[in-house]
Every structure is written in C-alpha cells, then in structure tokens.
Image: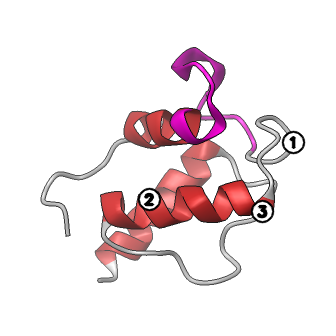
Amino acid sequence: MNSTTPTVDDLRRLIARHLELSLVMVDEDDRLHEDLQMDSLELYAVLADAETMYGALPEPGTVHNHTTVAELHAVMLQARAGQ
C-alpha cells in the first residue's frame, strides 16, 4: 500500500486523465455518470488505477453512477482503512 494517503485532488487528477478532461472540469461534487458522463468501462478503469493509488478496492455495490467524486474518495479511504 502507498504510505501517503491520497487526497480527493489526487482522485480528481486520475479521473480527469481517464476522461481526457482538464482538471478544472472535474469537481469533487460531480457525479460520475450524470455530470462526468463516465460509463461503466471508464469507471472500472478508474477503479483499477485507484486501487493502486489507495491500496484497496471498495466492496462491490458501494460505487454507483450517482456517486460523486468526493463520495468515491471517501469509499476508497474506507476500503484502505479496512486493509
């Protein structure tokens, strides 16, 4: 596991990179699907990279299309704490 705790801005950067957006286009209150237009394949790709960054994956079913960037960050931190 990475010894540095990732921030919500780290996750924003990761999402922006995957979606080929400017960082200013990804806000922590943005919903993954409705606001960022992230489809399920993009979500899985983000989660795969987030697993490397956070050192853990959330429980299945805890991340939904209406999840915001900040909520995803909180879920990833919970998963990290459970490892």
For residue 42, what is the image quadrant?
Answer: bottom right
Report the residue at 68% width, 46% height from top.
Answer: 68
Residue at the right extreme? 34
The amino acid marked with disc number 3 is Ser
Asked if residue 30 is positioned above or below residue 58 in the image, the reply reads above
Camera-side residue of 23 and 70: 23
Asked if the magenta segment contains residue 26, the reply would be yes
> In the drawing, what numbered circle is on residue 50?
2
The quarter in which the N terminus is drawn is bottom left
Q: Amino acid at mark 2?
A: Ala
The range drawn in magenta is 17-31
Q: Callout 1: helix, strand or loop?
A: loop
Q: Label 3 belongs to which residue?
A: 40
Element assignment for label 3:
helix
Pointer 2 or 1: first along the chain: 1
Asked which quadrant contains residue 47, the reply is bottom right
Image position of 11 (left or right of 39) = left
Q: What is the CA distance from the residue labelled 2 to the residue labelled 3?
A: 15 Å
Residue at mark 2 to residue at mark 1: CA–CA distance:
20 Å
- The residue labelled by disc 1 is 34
First in sequence, mark 2 or 3: give its number: 3
Relative to 73, 22 lies left or right: right
* Residue at 56% over, 45% down: 70
Which of labels 2 and 1 is toward the front? 2
In the rendered image, the quadrant that contains the C terminus is: bottom left
Q: Is residue 44 above or below residue 70?
A: below
Write the residue at 59% across / 53% down: 71
Residue 15 screen position, x and y as percent = 56, 41
Dot 2: what SS? helix
Task: Name the residue at the left extreme.
Answer: 3
Q: Mark 1: give few (<14), some (14-19) or many (20+) Cα within 10 Å.
A: few
